[in-house]
Image (cartoon, rainbow, N blue to C red):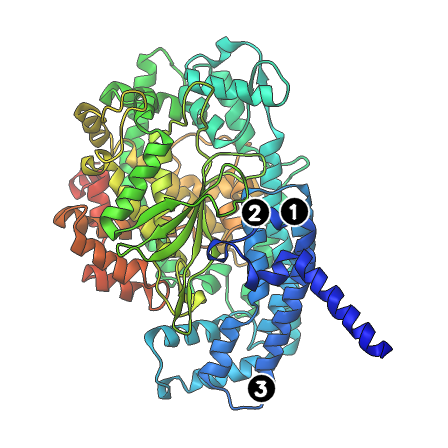
Amino acid sequence: MKKSIVLFSLTTICAMLTAQNPFLNYQNWKTPHGTYPFDAIKVEHYMPAFDEGIKQGLAEIDAIANNPAAPTFANTIEAYEKAGKLLSVVASCFYNLTSAETNDSLAALELELSPKLSEYSSTILLNEKLFERIKTVYEQKDKLKLTAEQSKMLDDIYEGFANNGANLSAEDKEQFKALQAKLSKLTLVYGQNVLKATNAWTRLIKDESLLAGLSDDTKQMLHANAAKKGLDGWLLDLKPTTYIPVMKYCDNRDIRRELYLAYNTRCIGGEFDNTQNIKEIVNTRLALANLFGKACYADKSLHKTMAETKENVYRLLDQLRDAYMPVARAEYDELQQFADSLGFYATLQAWDWSYYSEKLKNEKYALSDDELRPYFELENVKKGVFNLANKLYGLKFVKNPNIQVYHPEVDAYDVFDAKGKFLAVYYCDFHPRDGKRGGAWMNDYKPQYRDGKTDSRPHIVNVMNFTRATADKPALLTYDEVETFLHEFGHGLHGMLTRCQYASMSGTNVPRDFVELPSQFNENFLGEKAFLDTFAKHYLTGEPMPQALIDKIKAAQNYHAAYACARQLSFGYLDMAWHTITEPFDGDVIAFGNAAMEQVKVLPVVPETQMETAFTHIFAGGYAAGYYSYKWSEVLDADAFSVFKKNGIFDKKTADSFRTNILERGGTEPAMTLYKRFRGQEPTVDALMERDGITKTTKQND
């Protein structure tokens, strides 16, 4: 009798603990579409949920590995695909918030979790019994009646294990685990340092005359920044909403220089130094590559991309370098002459480029951000972006106030298809905060997959850092901010429209040099009058953007395109330089970076600066030996949009083909196969060069 009472008490206690921790009851959330109950989730819930998720995940893996039945696609591959669900639910929430709404508690927890999750991953990937079962199924692949998606998933899972040490010796497996754990912590610390360094720098301006040239809206924002901290004046920081307008419009060269140096020396020395972290990261990646018999990290990481080899990456970078650099240098010479005509008479430096570039652009085309902003009120832009998705794919976005959000500024929408069927949840988060890292991105809180006959639809988020409303004006975006919204929304469509069987194959689970196609493709519409006419209305009068202004946008579309390309190429060369080293690096990080970028440098080098100490894409993100993919995808997006230009930018048949063959298919087939199914041929650089005004004639003349 006593034993029964004790058991009952333990059951009751377990039930109470489960009820108190929402993650442990995720299957029963009474929220719209099973969205996260953010109001109920507390910091103290994460670690117990992670621990339980790890425990359940390992138990599920052990059950697969020790299954006495012969290995089959269902009992091994599909079972592996479904394992670790609780851990995925917890991790998705946690890591979305550490990017968009972090705090000291979450940052500390992130460091504590890093070795645990690295150990969890390594334990699974180095499970010999599990891999033997996967290998058995893989070797029978040709005899199995698999769909294209199943075949691709089997390939991906097998290669995922092989590329993460499954075929290594016992000794090398232990070394692999140690290296992975070390790399996980290094990249985490690197990213946290960037955020901390960005937030740590401010400069209070007491004399408003030092901010001459800035718009009243920008000065109001800077004044509000100061007021929030109990200060009187105008507070500069390193967030994009401050950095970009100051570099473009501030007449005071000393202020521009100070801000530039602060931004481009983040994490070089001092409390948040990343120079040593860079050395350790690249050397750890090299050691991992060497374990697999590869000479450099790029050799290991590129094999699953469209590019496949470092030689192909360099071929693209060099081809674009040769085509664009003569034009980029001519752009610099022209800008130097223009600045001199205004009485500058000094060598243009990095902190001068945006300022004089904007002035020349305004003289050539009479076009400035301040002239465009009134037509890009955030709510109107949202309507325009949503309407584009409606015109192309029949989507409808309906705000749902019953969906809980992680911050009051976040909006949540139900997304429906043309037949009124629920398609996705869409969160959008637009403005900078101290707890949000810089930049803009798309992610999912829940991926799409099929569970039996049920199509479990995704929950997608776009996070950005756009201009806020001021005391007397709504949020008025710059042209670049609208373009960024379209870019991230393109990723969002990739996530929302996906229709796949398995979560690991759906949405943006595609090669790095293919994932940017939907996003960069979406940017093309901003230069089209037919799209601008749908939303670009003056926020006060409601008048549409005048034809004369649209003509200026079109005329200015290629303005300094060669310089912009050279800048992107410099990032690509920098990334490849770090990830093609074949010997451990212990040199001067800044000098190495400057040397890597030298061949595509347009502006004079500022010796004490280097962007790599805050280059989170490659040192704390997923773009190591992959930053070239932005240019690779740009070739794809220009080529793809040329079809829309030919057939009509809202042509339904073309849009249906793009949706069916690209956006819905995720990573279910090789990327080039999907692209050729849409395009009918492999892409060429011709459409990109034509769009940028870099013709073969231009190249030869230069």
Q: Is residue 252 left or right of residue 331?
A: right
Position of 440 relative to 186 (above/below) = above
Name the residue tied to disc 3.
Answer: 67
- Find out whether the residues at labels 1 and 2 contact each other: C-beta distance under 8 Å: yes
Q: Secondary structure at mark 3?
A: loop
Rendered location of residue 573, percent (x, y): 42, 47
Could you classify mark 3 by the number of other residues whose Cα lies within 10 Å: few (under 14), some (14-19), or many (20 or more)? some
Give the numbered dot on residue 106: 1
Task: Residue at 38% x, 76% y: name it.
Answer: 150
Q: In which quadrant is the C terminus drawn?
A: top left
Name the residue at the left extreme. Answer: 647
Quarter residue 524 falls in: top left
Could you classify mark 1 by the number of other residues whose Cα lies within 10 Å: few (under 14), some (14-19), or many (20 or more)? some
Q: Secondary structure at mark 1?
A: helix
Give the numbered dot on residue 208: none
Sequence order check: which comes first, mark 2 or mark 3? Answer: 3
In the image, 185 versus 214, the foreground residue is: 214
- Find out whether the residues at labels 1 and 3 contact each other: C-beta distance under 8 Å: no
Residue 107 visible in the snapshot: yes
Type of residue at label 1?
Answer: Leu
Q: CA–CA distance between discs 1 and 2?
A: 8 Å
Name the residue tied to disc 2.
Answer: 97
Type of residue at label 3?
Answer: Asn
In the image, 694 versus 459, the foreground residue is: 459
Q: CA–CA distance between discs 2 and 3?
A: 37 Å
Position of 342 relative to 497 (above/below) = above
Type of residue at label 2?
Answer: Leu
Q: Is residue 484 left or right of residue 159?
A: left
Task: Residue at 42% x, 73% y: name it.
Answer: 153
Position of 124 relative to 372 (above/below) = below
Rendered location of residue 211, percent (x, y): 48, 14
